[in-house]
Image (cartoon, rainbow, N blue to C red):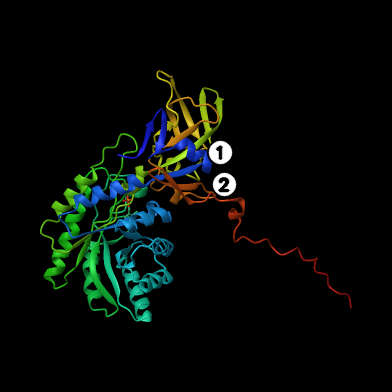
Amino acid sequence: MNHFQPRRGQLHAERIPLAALARDHGTPLYVYSTATLTRHWKVLGASLRGLDALVCYAVKANSNLAVLATFARLGAGFDIVSGGELFRVLKAGGRPGQVVFSGVGKRDDELAFALDAGVGTINVESAGELARLSAVARRLKVRAPIALRVNPDVDPKTHPYIATGLRESKFGVPVAEARRLYHQAVRDPHLDVRGVACHIGSQITSLRPFIDAVGRVRALATDLARAGIRLRHLDVGGGLGVTYHHEAPPSPAAYGAAITKALAGWDGEVHLEPGRVLVGNAGILLTRVLQLKKSGRKTFVVVDAAMNDLVRPAFYDAWHDIEPVVTPAKGARAVTCDVVGPVCESGDFLARNRKLVLPAEGDLLCVRTAGAYGFTMASNYNSRPRAAEVLVDGDRALLARERETYTDLIRGEALPPPARKPFRRRRG
Ligand SMILES: *Cc1c(COP(=O)(O)O)cnc(C)c1O
């Protein structure tokens, strides 16, 4: 369910025609829907009613301040993976006590920033990081609240780039090592052992891997309790998939019910770190057709959005539905074409061999389900200023991020000093 639907022959974002947003803000343009964000949040929350749950939205999926503030106002916690994300969460009004800091490579200054801000939990991913965090906490004269992120060694059956819970992945620590590290951590006066965490991957479309992972993590918590180490929370990570094409992931309600069942009898808190499922179809990328081009048998629709704006097709060979903003006439014939951007890479495409009613130059296209890992993965490749972002709420549109300018492109860069005169030895 999402609030990007046709009305009177034109796609709208809630009550605003996409064409009006393109006119006011230009293209390429990311558009997010408050009603969709709010709905997803509520559906997931309702499915967890049986648990003492804290839902920590995974900031890296979409870190726009207006999106973060929308979740903060709904009572969300946040899952962060960098100091920069913590900075954003604080700016957006997130409560630091409900922040979980994950990630396999945290710098000392990021750990110090997190401790200073008072984050709720730091998910530690290695023995070395545990030692380093202890040293940082000692220096700051605080106790670091920690969970260990364990690697439950389950196959999430997703794209290899986003599978994170396999034995050979760089993330987390194996269960046996985690057990040893817990015994070490509880004796460390600078560490406050709070919980255990896992996160097995992203765009997961079946319940089985989640249930297996939760089972393994829970078994570890039970073992530790027997050894006198009682954990307050169990963090099940994120990773629930969305529908881009033909996938049929479990609904948030079914997912919540499965987690609740897998944790029956667990009397501690439960933390969740969903990203994609909350924001994926709450965002679209609006782009304008620059050019139609025929090359041999192929038809190219050249648009003004490119891989620097939305890298998922190029990076993961991902599918995004593409629709004309103005509904085509009934019976209009679809042709097979590639929708490509202006970047100088053959990998720069939004869709390949796609059946579309051939648009005209100047037409607007809507690239769906671009709210997650869309703008956050955007770059300035080819010196393309990054797109603007708009957050719609009913009939109001907030320019949530201005389009970058050429001046933004070179901010912080420097020219080398003027060439020095060639050095000449003085004769003497
Ligand atoms: C990316 C990430 C998430 C969110 O994953 P989604 O697939 O977007 O739900 C949660 N936790 C951690 C540690 C992550 O790295």
Q: CA distance from mark 1 to mark 2?
A: 10 Å
Q: Amino acid at mark 1?
A: Pro
**Residue 121 higher or lower than 308, as above or below:** below
Q: CB under 8 Å between callouts 1 and 2?
A: yes
Write down the quadrant of residue 293 in the picture: top right
Which disc number belongs to residue 93?
Answer: none
Residue depicted at 43% across the width and 24% down the height:
328
**Residue 3 higher or lower than 153, as above or below:** above
Q: Residue furthest right?
A: 428
Residue 132 shows in the view: yes
Image quarter of the C terminus: bottom right
Q: Is residue 405 left or right of residue 348?
A: right
Most foreground residue, 328 or 359:
328
Q: Which residue is mark 1?
A: 342
Q: Please, what secondary structure does the residue beneath circle 1 have?
A: loop
Residue 160 shows in the view: no
Which disc number belongs to residue 384?
Answer: 2
Q: Position of residue 388 (x, y in %)?
A: 50, 47
Q: Position of residue 344 (x, y in %)?
A: 57, 40
Q: Is residue 150 left or right of residue 382?
A: left
Q: Is residue 345 left or right of residue 87?
A: right
